[in-house]
Image (cartoon, rainbow, N blue to C red):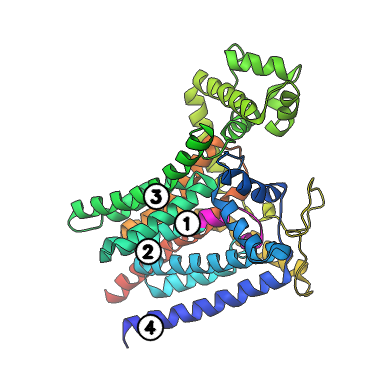
Amino acid sequence: MDVSRLTNHRTAYLLTYLSVLHLLVWLTQFVGITDDSFGQLTTLRQIAQGIPAYFPPGYPLLVGLGHLIWAAKAGLVITLVQHAMMIVTILWCFWLLERCVGALIACGATLVMGVAAPTLLTPQAILSENVALFGMTGALYYAVRYRDRGRTRDGITGGLLLGWATLARIVPMAGGFPAIFVVMLGAKPLSLGVKRFGIAMAVALLVVVTTIAWFAVRDNRFVLADSLGFHLYDRVFTAEGLIDPYAPATMRLQKLAGPVDLRSVPHWKVGPPLGKKNLDDWQVESLLRQASLEGISKAPLTFIGFSLRQVWRQYFENPTPQIPSGLNYQLTQHDPTLELPPILSARGTLWRYALERGFAVIWPVIPWLSLAGLVSILFVRERGIFLSFAIIAFGYLLATALVEFELPRYDVAIIPFMFCLAAGPFALFGTVFDYFVDW
């Protein structure tokens, strides 16, 4: 039978399987929200005026689309689009993984990936990780197509997707750039791969630079968001306690904050008192950023070591409990267009609990299988693609650890890549088994 027909059949079966699962989740689950969910639309209005906001513009674009389509039920529209994005993401993973380990193992990995709690529940929540994951996976998929087929539109599409992912969470560029470079090393001749890498990355950078230029022209600030200082403060002061008490910005911060231990309060508690001292949000962010950089400058090796340990810890943490369920009664804001109950009353809470409990059972094995996948890289067919899974995952975690405090929820953006890596040991086992059978 024609191999292309077999691949089409497998894709059709997987598409049906994934569509049924995601439709059930969309129909039976609350829209998952956090306090951050309510700031997305306001952010979009602020960005349209050329003023940088706390959130970068990538995810507010999707939220704005949901409100544009159906303002009264925007949460349903956003999550439906996100479920479709996750389905496509998993299919991209299947097509890439199939080239590395073969159809049988790739199908098995995709079936497990598809029913895993993070891939089913993350699209049901208003989280920017949805765009980050979709953009990084799509960029990798289209980079492979561009390498093999040479169609410029594939390179442009991959660059646009990575640019969008970067506008959503900033850090995807850290894993996406080197991963796509490794993929392009498989081109023949090599110079052609380097050229195609340059084209794809130029598109991604153009997306980012154009956005920064918009803010620079309108508000004279060369940033994607005005929240770096807040995140760095939480990471450097609160998480690590790395402070240079005699540095000028730190001394000013301590004076304005009053008699509090800055290592014990997050930015959302230290910010309001500073606001009462006639500092606007931009000045508060700038002061926190400067003080944080002073702490890093005091002990850079300590900072790097702590970041690497955070990567290692976070890599093993189960993100599922931190995916919002829509039953969070501690919200400080409310929005009826997002806080929506399930369409069908079908004991969705029990279904969610079963998904979370099932994933908690298999999760302790997944990180170790993924690490074992790196050992088995010599036995996969497309080593560049397989290695790129690891580069994206660990690049994303490392970039996050350099600017964010430890939060397991961030891992949801790398779960599919971990499942892809976890398929590696099975490919190794198959190679050894075939060797002894042939022998």
CA–CA distance in space, label 4 to label 3? 34 Å
Q: Earlier in the sequence, mark 3 or mark 1?
A: 1
Q: Residue at x 50, y 77 (%)?
A: 14
Describe the element under mark 3 as helix, strand or loop.
helix
Q: Is residue 112 left or right of residue 142?
A: right
Q: Nearer the viewer, mark 3 or mark 1?
A: 3
**Residue closer to the observer: 298 or 51:** 51
Q: Quadrant of residue 373?
A: bottom left
The amino acid type of the residue labelled 4 equals Leu
- Mark 1 and mark 4 residues within 8 Å of each other at the beta carbon: no
CA–CA distance in space, label 1 to label 4? 27 Å
Q: Residue at x 32, y 73 (%)?
A: 434
Q: Residue at x 59, y 66 (%)?
A: 81
Highlighted range, magenta? 122-133
Q: Position of residue 40 (x, y in %)?
A: 65, 49
Residue holding disc 2: 428
- Considering every residue shown, the one lying at the far top of the view is 246
Above or below, 363 relative to 81? above
